[in-house]
Amino acid sequence: MISEELELEKSLTLGSFTTSIEQIRTRLKAYNSLLAQIDVAQAELVEEEKRLKHMTSDMLTGVASKYGKDSYEYKLAGGTRRSERKRPVHKSKPVLPD
């Protein structure tokens, strides 16, 4: 219950303090609105990336069915030719003496 005419210094008045609070509230509201827009944009981007990933897979499958998985066309489309795949090396377990 401080007086509305409170003035501590020339720039420190209750009116200027209230104005500053309102400015911060306005900026915070705008900031939160922008964050919400960013969240929507990010969700849309993630969905588009998923669609593109599926389309890429379908395109590669189409090239493989037309030219084969060992063709140069398959490699040009982003696949790895079967003849160029590294085969896993299975290491045998050493036999321990009794």
Image (cartoon, helix red, strand yellow):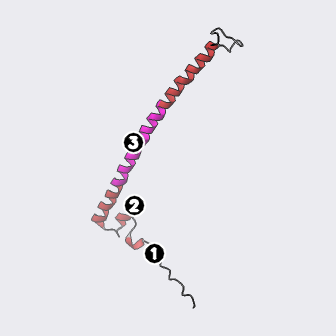
* The magenta stretch spans residue 49: yes
Residue assigned mark 3:
44
Classify mark 3: residues with Cα within 10 Å, few (<14), some (14-19) or many (20+): few
Q: Residue 88 carries which label?
A: 1
Residue assigned mark 2:
78
Q: Which amino acid does label 1 sit on?
A: Pro
Classify mark 2: residues with Cα within 10 Å, few (<14), some (14-19) or many (20+): some
- Magenta residues? 33-54
Q: Which amino acid does label 2 sit on?
A: Gly
Q: As rendered, which of 75 and 18 lies closer to the eye?
A: 18
Q: What secondary structure is marked by label 2?
A: loop
The residue lying at 54 percent from left, 85 percent from top is 94
Q: Main secondary structure of the magenta part?
A: helix
Asked if the residue at tag 2 contacts the one at tag 3, i.e. Cβ–Cβ closer than 8 Å, the answer is no
Residue 71's spot in the image, x, y percent? Answer: 34, 68
Residue 29's spot in the image, x, y percent? Answer: 50, 27
Residue 74's spot in the image, x, y percent? Answer: 35, 64
The residue lying at 50 percent from left, 80 percent from top is 91
Q: Which amino acid does label 3 sit on?
A: Glu
Classify mark 1: residues with Cα within 10 Å, few (<14), some (14-19) or many (20+): few
* The magenta stretch spans residue 40: yes
